[in-house]
Image (cartoon, rainbow, N blue to C red):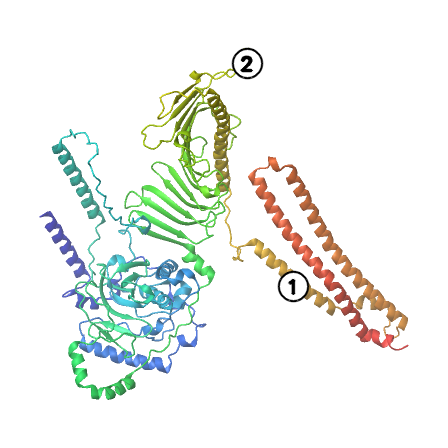
Amino acid sequence: MEVLKENEEEEQREEEELKALEISGKQYDVGRKLSVDQACTPNDVPDFDWSSIDTSQLPSSYKTNSPEEKKLLCIADNFLQQYAHLCPDREPLLLHPVNECGVEKFVSTTVRPTLLPYTELYHWEGCASFVSDYLTMELLKSPIAPPSSLYSPTTILKYQRGNCFDFSVLLCSMLIGAGYDAYCVNGYATHNICTMDETLEVCPLLRKPQEVPKQEEKKSSKYRVKPPPDLQSKFELQQEAKKEAQEKKERKEEEKETEKPKRDPLYGLRVHAWVLVLSGKREVPETFFINPFTGNSHSTTDEQFLGIESVWNHRNYWVNMQDCWNGCKDLIFDLGDSVRWEFMLLETDKPRLLLPDVEEEEELFDRDMDNVEKEEEDRRFDMPPSWVAPIQISPREFETRSPQGRKVILYKKAKLEKWAPYLNRNGLIQRLTIYADSHYTKVVEVREWFKNREDKLEMREVNKQTQLITEHFCPGHLLGLKAHIYTSTEPETERTMEFYNEARVDGLQKRVENASEMSEYFVGRDDFLYFRHVEFGKRVKKIHMAGTRTDVNPRPIVQIKECFRRNLEKPADEDVAERIFLITEERINLTYHLNDKYITASKKNFFKGVERDRKGNEIIMTPEMCITYQVGSSEADKKLFHLHKLLQKLTEEEKQLKNEVWESATEVLEILKIREDEEADIKLTVSIYDTERNEKRRQEYEAMNNLMEDDLLGQEEQDLDYLAPFLIQICNIEKMSKWQALRIKEDCLTDFKHHLTHKANIIQAHLQKEVEELQKKDQWYQENQNQLSMEDEADFLAYCSETMFRIRVLALRLQREKQMAPQKYLALEEKLRKDPRLNMHLNHP
């Protein structure tokens, strides 16, 4: 009864809203009479004046129509008149809206198939994701009517904004260019789809794939031990299960009530445009929809898509003649079926579907087919080429994606933020914030994704409730770090470190540590070690600073336990499976692998005593110092000499193990110090092919340009008047003697020779200075190599790289200068020989 009352109240509210909007009679008929002002209820329409855009630089095809386009518009008007006459109850079709220049253009010619040179855009997922990220959504001026204008994809890309029709035309152009059988759709959808409201949708990053239940194989229970009888009350268990199920059901109902979308008075009338992709091409197995606002794919039976008026591509235009009373669930997308889809142009790439009766009639009238074909050829009209200029996206635009490089999307109890690469100095490209409530106030978890970082950090997860931080790294970290799970950066606190074992010599895969224990897991070792567990005691002094070396005040080791896998080259009785070094108790316990057909393993327990007595004599090993259990033998092993040798070997290995444990503890502190330094000074890597961001490549490019400029300056120098400073010394040039002319020529050539030599000497001096500095730095590195930290080594390598680059540039300039000097000298000599001011005195006495 309560549900019926709520439904009645909602119906009453809906009727009041419809009355307020002056809607009477049937929704479908009266919706056309709504004014634009009454229908434009959304208040978040972006403020952008499309009438102020500059169209003066657009091509002439944007401003005028070709004869084929004019003929197409006449055909479209005729088609629209016939459609309105045959279907007077249906909405007017969107056929030829005006473009940005105010010129009517047929919608099919607005589609410009384009294949862009980016690998990501070769697939529909990449195209849809790019369009949804790159453009800013604008709502339709009237939610119940298609737009009166449809701009070109080039203009939409330029201003990075548009409505659902602009999104769809751009996406359809990219999909057709990539080889998909794609179409723009003019139809109706729900409020959430039309307004890109995803607050009731689960974030795609949080959707879990459906798990296929595994069928457990029934094993024979002939020798299985029967479980103990269950003494719990079945009635109480049933009552508790019923209570939990009822509480769970009530919680779900409460969530549904709170998250239930409000009643939409314009349900079924809201116009929306999306993309239809038919099966067949590009190995698409099933027809599906793409919502251009979100880039998500939807089934054709999705309840959010309520109907279709028409579809079009770059070749034709089809009108849906099927009933959409059940949304798009029952629609058949066979565009060759002329009964379900009415096409505008006869020239279509879809084969026509003929009914059996029509096929029989065609067989009866085969002799008239020639005349029919001639009539069709006369009536046939091909779709004119697109009037839109080629779609182009620069690499920087493709990389930046969203306007200003940032986009925020709200999902159900989650917020997703996206940034362009290199926009944030820390390399952050994506952040997902998960909330406990639908009002986005209580943060539960934060996930961040990074890119192009030198420390190879790829992802960071922060649990705000437990303060647990999980960091994931790409291959290539300095110490092979793969993951780091911790709550505090202080040393000797609880943490887990995972490593790329292929990049490490010791094969370490994971290290788990806390204040009193440390466990290490290994893979692929030659000694078959796969697990090591260390227990520490309490130290007198504690470490307070991250980065303090453990060898200053190491934690005392109480016990070391190691586990080994089976080595088939050894007998099971000689292949150690587990050994425990009880250091404080001075004991060593060995457990060997199980032998075939035995249920117990051989064991040896050593008790380390004093190796020498008070007089300094070595104590011979006694049987009490080793307890041996040999499987399959009732007699104790009396070969004390071999046991003594084994004990000595284990004692040496114990010392070595202590050093390895301390090295592991030191490595943990070193990783913490490196991570602290990396977070304090975050550096991003740049591809060598990115010449705009790569500083070294830019310097090399500038150096080559400088060399080219030097060559140009050398040519300009040849055009300079070198005689002018020497001719000033003579008052009257016309009365100059032959001896004076020769003297001026020689002085000019000598001065130019000194100039070339001086220039080469300067370059040589700079080169020699750089080489000496590099030698001094290398000598300093060789002397202090063992004392340098990793940071100092990195700085040294960076300095060497920069210095070697400068040396190469100087050497190249010096070489070119020496090669060009004789040519420049000869060129000047030839120029002076032909100079008329000297020629008249040199050739005549």
Query: What kind of residue is marked 2?
Result: Asn
Tell me residue 137's x, y (percent). Answer: 34, 60
Work out whether 446 lies above or below 628.
Answer: below
How many C-alpha atoms fall within 10 Å of the one at disc 1: few (<14), some, or many (≥20)? few
Tell me residue 738's x, y (percent). Answer: 89, 73
Give the quadrant of the C terminus: bottom right
- The residue under label 2 is 617
Q: Secondary structure at mark 2?
A: loop
- The residue under label 1 is 708
Mark 1 / mark 2, whichever is N-terminal: 2
How many C-alpha atoms fall within 10 Å of the one at disc 2: few (<14), some, or many (≥20)? few
Tell me residue 407's x, y (percent). Answer: 38, 54
Query: Along the line of sight, which residue is nearer the eye, 844 or 779?
Result: 779
Q: Secondary structure at mark 1?
A: helix
- Choose top left, top right, bottom left or bottom right for residue 187: bottom left
Query: What kind of residue is marked 1?
Result: Met
Query: Along the line of sight, which residue is nearer the eye, 304 or 800?
Result: 800
Work out whether 781 lies above or below 55.
Answer: above
